[in-house]
Image (cartoon, grey):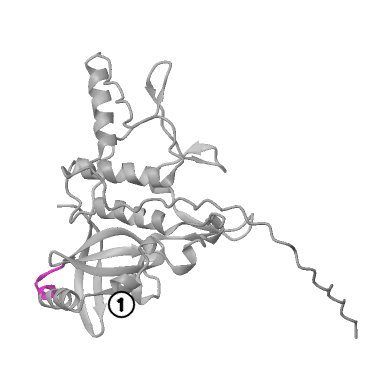
Amino acid sequence: MPRTVWSGAISFGLVTVPINVVSATEDHSVRFHQYHLEDMGRVRVRKFCEAEDREVRNDEIGKGYQLTKEQVIPISDDELRDLPLPTAKAIEIEAFVPLESVDPIRIGEGYYLQPSGQVAHKPYKLLAQALGRSAKVAVAKYAWSGRERLGLLRVRDDVIVLHAMRWPDEIRDPTELLPPPVELSDEEVEGALALMDSMTREDLEGGEFQDTYTEALEQIIEAKREHREPPAMPEPEGESGQIVDLMAALTQSVQKARANRGEDADVHDLPKKKKAAKKQPAKKTAAKKTPGRKPRRSA
């Protein structure tokens, strides 16, 4: 069972649901330490006090806010825990909104909310069922780690999940990253839609969604432990070089996607790129003389 990272309550109007918060995800990344290459001695980071020029223990370290160059305001963990905020002790639900109205870029880490004690079972179930039937999510405020946060509550397998959210002013404006205006033909757009259709699936299960980077690292570590050569990197699939013709690239991509799914790789429904009609030379005709336009007089 993962450890509890925070304890408090969900405030739903006048209904209070005591909960424990546990992480909903696990990190399986391969971890490295830093070593001195000459003798493989472990390299560690030590904490020194600038005023006394000595290493200090963790129990000697606290938080502080630098007001001026000479003045630092100390802030204790107890003071942060006892902030005069309703969200310091509870996850305060502010509103209910459709999930599609929330930009995914604002959604962060997920946590499972566990009912704390017998008294929490009924209101917890009530909120979970109400969220499930309404097809909406709750937007809430809560305070962790010295700052107030925005969160999203939803239901996953009858368990209430809290997702950390970013405040609106924490999202950068992406307009400066837009490419210059370009023209796309209907055939190119339809080709992209055909590729999307050939790559559509109902779930995210399968070997394509496994962490191959971690697997490759583990193979290298195991090979070096056994004093043998690490496995060679596989050659990239496909032809070298870039395909300049966008329609050709889309056609080849659809063929590959269908072949990977065991379907007919022949592409019959992609629109053909229309060839520009050759312009016929204009027949020479006697030019009619037209009287020259008189310039307008200025008022």
x and y percentages locating residue 274 in the rendered image = 42, 52
**Number of other residues with Cα within 10 Å of mark 1, as a class: few under 14, some 14 to 19, many 20 or more:** some
Outermost residue, top side: 227
In percent of the image, x 45 and y 50: which residue is there? Answer: 275
Mark 1 — residue? 97
State left or right for residue 118 relative to residue 102.
Answer: left
Above or below 127: residue 242: above
- Front residue of 13 and 273: 273
Q: Is residue 280 magenta?
A: no
- Front residue of 133 and 174: 174
- Front residue of 272 and 198: 272
Q: Quadrant of residue 113?
A: bottom left
x and y percentages locating residue 196 in the rendered image = 30, 54
Dot 1 amino acid type:
Val
Stretch of the chain drawn in magenta: 115-121
In percent of the image, x 28 and y 30: which residue is there? Answer: 217
State left or right for residue 214 relative to residue 203.
Answer: right
Q: Is residue 120 magenta?
A: yes
